[in-house]
Image (cartoon, helix red, strand yellow):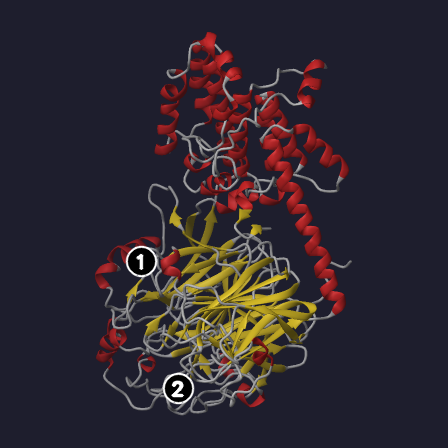
């Protein structure tokens, strides 16, 4: 069947009552089938008013489906369920929790998105739904549910396809878990028989060869060569991406033909033509006025070019503006521009500019470029006397113009005014500090949030989430910001970040400001199903950055990484606004967009004097996926008034001036200092040669350990000083310390040579457990090999050897398998390892698997740990 079968529409699905715990009086479960909000008796109520006894109601769907949402109808009453869990399953005996939420005590129905994919992102079918109320709003009241409605994908062809794929997945998982379990315990013949009879592979053939060389034969040269082959085959890429990254900044010094560059500014917009290596820059605020100059930077030529000194003078060109956004369409070569905050927008009237600094520190209405107009009640700069030039509409108009610029074809260099007011055609109102993203293949633009620019500037109003279909010129509004239409909903905001993963059709929306609060939340919006998932209510507590405003973010969908450059931060609504200088650079990595990923701070490289730009906000960034490079321009490095702003025309500051500015930045945090610098950021991770070195270091540690136990001490010491030492990074303190400890840990602690073999072969099976000294627990764990190698450690710790209970048992002897005996009889190059050595090598082998991509190796989980009180969890 077609794996790319399109998702059908979501529709209501009928159900019947399959069972429930005891009910109270006439409040039977069947009451929830019909929504009668005015009937106080139309509800199901549990028989016991206590949270210590499980109460539940189970629904049987009338058709197999992929469940997407559940809606609770309610009536205001103290017996209303306050906290509830929802479980789903194909059968009543194997239910999985998919929702745990709190309900409000009101008469408004609440709809919640249901997680409908398993841990690898595969949709699964549902036949049964179990609702478990945990508490009521009123103390000592029985929990009640008034009405439940369900929505699902019910198309029979699609659901049957999902069912078959899910059953195939479960079979594969079960077989691979069994094979891993058997091989760990040296049942090699049964594993070989299973592989010969099913179309399932335990792992990549290179990994199977590595197991044979490392565990069964102790063939160290072959094991090292196989590690290099794995790197060449791309099997170590996930480990590389999971390593601690470092940043390498370089200042771009390119000029235009006249020796000029874009002047100092903040609140401007940039976009990138990835195919041709061109970065476009438009508008912004220079501290005195809004700008409408238009530039392009050629990456290959390292040169700027001025496309227009003033776009307002061109036909259909946009006027001066800041806090706007623009995106580039790689299919047509068009640039789309939306939003603004210009010199005449905002409230009328003025205040002294000296008030700006104090307002910025205390008011909720801080705009990213810190211009006087951005502070509620602080007034705005004088509108341009005589009005703007050209055909651009006057600033007094609160219309939301929508522009397109052509970079290719017969209309190259020309502007189109697509709409004089997007709000009149179903789009967003005039907004500033919003976000835009474009899906090139689907030809759809997404616009998120932003502050509404209108005559009521003091009244904070925010826009929601819209899409614009380029082919049909139609706008669509999503109800993601409506608490009554979507749950979870995305609170409206401005100065936030939004990026698009076009392959997974998911928007990530996070941070920004709402009212007086800087936000640290993060949401994923799945476009095809209109599903909102709250990834973090506060990512700071999950190891992420502080709540931030005017931060900038770009995405690499291939790597599934989001790069974030922080701006302003404020820990409390009444706290002081500060520039993030301690931890301004972050990466967010995700495997599945609907599940919380991992935040990692990016640190400078190990250069003697690392070059880094000074902290800033209201800057702009773009990302070039071909080179994996981030480009950053301008912004504001201070929080004061414009009185301290240095005047002058655009000029290129020198690296020496940058160093001076960076050094004095903390001392002059109160002075506004808009920037004209242009930077290139490369996120650096270990090269594959470095990863191979780390893995070879693991192999040689095991080889040294066995030489200490079996061979000559002199040979072992020589091997340590030469072969092991040659793959140690002696400049890394932790790795060097572990290397020094190997002598005492193995050579000096080795037992007498005459007793080693006997001790290994005669040790009772009960002492051969996998509980102690498992992977990831010793000094040679990949996590200790180098900073950022935690991926290897965490994977190996989860691999099931050493992480679960001991497997010591009279039934488990780890004796030589018949396959090994046959190979030995045929003249194998090495004798089979003893039971103790097999166990030891298996632990080290699974440590090596920490370097290998998940799809290329045996499952990380242990079969023993997959058992739960409710059965086997797959």
Quarter of the rendering containing residue 276:
bottom right
**Observer-nearest of 7 and 582:** 7
Q: Please tell me which of labels 1 and 2 falls first in the chain.
A: 2
Q: Position of residue 783 (x, y in %)?
A: 43, 38
Look at the picture and state if 837 lies above or below 60: above
Distance, label 1 to label 2, CA atoms, is 32 Å
Which mark's residue is nearer the viewer, 1 or 2? Answer: 1
Which residue: 57% across, 22% down? 220
Which residue: 43% across, 57% down? 679
For numbered disc 1, what is the local secondary structure?
Answer: loop
Find disc 1 in the rendering and name its residue. 581
**Observer-nearest of 288 and 180:** 180
Find disc 2 in the rendering and name its residue. 345
Crowding at label 2, few (<14), some or many (≥20) Cα neighbours within 10 Å? Answer: many
Query: From this viewpoint, is residue 459 visible?
Result: yes
**Observer-nearest of 251 and 815:** 815
For numbered disc 2, what is the local secondary structure?
Answer: loop
Look at the picture and state if 551 lies above or below 141: above
Specify whether 463 is left or right of 71.
left
Specify whether 749 is left or right of 328.
left
Quarter of the rendering containing residue 415:
bottom right
Instruction: Give the mark count.
Output: 2
Which residue: 62% across, 16% down? 830
Q: Position of residue 721 (x, y in %)?
A: 42, 18
The mark found on residue 90 in the picture is none
**Observer-nearest of 691 and 32:** 32
């Amino acid at each position: 069947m077609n794996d790319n079968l399109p998702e059908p529409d979501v529709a209501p699905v009928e159900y019947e009552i399959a069972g429930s715990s005891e009910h109270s009086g006439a409040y039977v479960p069947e009451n929830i089938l019909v929504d009668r909000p005015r009937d106080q008796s139309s509800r199901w109520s549990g028989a016991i008013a206590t949270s210590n006894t499980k109460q539940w109601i189970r629904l049987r769907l009338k058709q197999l489906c992929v469940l997407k949402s559940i809606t609770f109808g309610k009536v205001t009453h103290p017996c209303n369920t306050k906290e509830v869990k929802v479980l789903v399953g194909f059968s009543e005996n194997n239910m999985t929790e998919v929702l745990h939420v709190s309900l409000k005590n009101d008469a408004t129905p609440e709809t919640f998105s249901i997680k409908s994919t398993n841990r690898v992102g595969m949709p699964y079918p549902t036949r049964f739904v179990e609702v478990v109320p945990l508490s009521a709003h009123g103390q000592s009241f029985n929990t009640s549910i008034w009405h439940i409605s369900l929505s699902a994908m019910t198309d029979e062809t699609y659901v049957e396809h999902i069912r078959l794929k899910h059953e195939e997945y479960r079979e594969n998982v079960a077989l691979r878990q069994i094979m891993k379990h058997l091989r760990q315990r040296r049942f090699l013949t049964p594993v070989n028989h299973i592989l010969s009879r099913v179309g399932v592979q335990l792992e990549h053939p290179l990994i199977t060869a590595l197991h044979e060389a490392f565990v069964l034969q102790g063939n160290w040269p072959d094991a090292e060569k196989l590690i290099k082959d794995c790197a060449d085959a791309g099997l170590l890429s996930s480990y590389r991406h999971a390593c601690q990254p470092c940043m390498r900044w370089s200042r771009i010094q390119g000029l235009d033909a006249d020796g000029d560059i874009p002047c100092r500014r903040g609140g401007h917009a940039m976009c990138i033509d990835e195919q041709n290596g061109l970065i476009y820059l438009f508008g912004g605020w220079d501290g005195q006025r809004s700008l409408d100059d238009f530039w392009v930077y050629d990456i290959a030529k390292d040169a700027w070019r001025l496309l227009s000194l003033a776009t307002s003078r061109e036909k259909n060109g946009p006027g001066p503006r800041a806090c706007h956004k623009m995106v580039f369409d790689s299919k047509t070569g068009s640039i789309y521009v939306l939003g603004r905050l210009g010199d005449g927008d905002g409230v009328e009237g003025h205040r002294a500019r000296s008030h700006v600094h104090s307002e910025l520190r205390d008011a909720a209405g801080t705009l990213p470029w810190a211009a006087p107009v951005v502070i509620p009640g602080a007034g705005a700069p004088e509108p341009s006397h005589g009005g703007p030039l050209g055909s651009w509409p006057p600033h007094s108009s609160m219309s939301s113009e929508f522009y397109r610029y052509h970079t290719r074809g017969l209309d190259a260099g020309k502007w189109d005014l697509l709409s004089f007011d997007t709000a009149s055609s179903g789009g967003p109102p005039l907004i500033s500090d919003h976000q835009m993203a474009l899906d090139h293949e689907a030809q759809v633009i997404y616009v998120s949030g932003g502050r509404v620019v209108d005559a009521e500037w003091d009244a904070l109003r925010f826009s929601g989430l819209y899409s614009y279909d380029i082919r049909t010129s139609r706008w669509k509004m999503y109800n993601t910001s409506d608490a009554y239409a979507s749950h979870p909903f995305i609170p409206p905001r401005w100065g936030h970040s939004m990026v698009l993963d076009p392959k997974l059709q998911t928007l990530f929306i996070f941070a920004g400001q709402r009212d007086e609060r800087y936000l640290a939340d993060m949401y994923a919006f799945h476009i095809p199903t209109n599903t909102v998932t709250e990834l973090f209510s506060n990512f700071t507590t999950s190891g992420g950055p502080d709540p931030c405003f005017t931060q900038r973010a770009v995405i690499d969908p291939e790597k599934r990484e989001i790069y974030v450059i922080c701006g302003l931060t404020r820990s409390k609504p009444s706290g002081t606004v500060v520039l993030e200088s301690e931890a301004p650079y972050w990466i967010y990595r995700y495997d599945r967009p609907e599940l919380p990923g991992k935040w990692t701070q990016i640190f400078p490289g190990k250069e003697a004097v690392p070059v880094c730009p000074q902290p800033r906000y209201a800057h702009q960034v773009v990302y070039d996926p071909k080179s994996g490079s981030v480009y950053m321009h301008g912004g504001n490095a201070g929080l004061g008034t414009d009185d301290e702003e240095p005047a002058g025309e655009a000029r290129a500051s020198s690296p020496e001036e940058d160093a001076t500015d960076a050094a004095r930045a903390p001392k002059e945090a109160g002075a506004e200092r808009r920037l004209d610098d242009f930077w290139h950021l490369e996120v650096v991770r270990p090269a594959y040669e470095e990863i191979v070195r780390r893995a070879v270091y693991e192999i040689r540690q095991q080889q040294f350990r066995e030489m200490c136990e079996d061979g000559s001490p002199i040979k072992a010491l020589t091997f340590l000083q030469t072969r092991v030492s040659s793959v140690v990074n002696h400049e890394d303190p932790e790795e060097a310390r572990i290397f020094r400890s190997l002598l005492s840990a193995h050579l000096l602690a080795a037992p007498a040579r005459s007793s080693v073999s006997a001790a290994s072969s005669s040790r009772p099976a009960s002492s051969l457990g996998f509980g102690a000294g498992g992977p990831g627990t010793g000094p040679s764990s990949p996590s200790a090999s180098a900073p950022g190698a935690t991926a290897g450690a965490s994977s190996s710790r989860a691999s099931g050897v050493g992480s679960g209970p001991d497997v010591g048992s009279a039934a488990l002897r780890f004796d030589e398998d018949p396959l090994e005996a046959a190979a030995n009889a045929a003249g194998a190059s090495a004798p089979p390892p003893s039971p103790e050595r097999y166990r030891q090598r298996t632990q080290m082998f699974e440590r090596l698997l920490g370097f290998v991509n998940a799809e290329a190796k045996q499952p990380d989980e242990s079969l023993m740990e997959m058992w739960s009180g409710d059965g086997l969890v797959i």
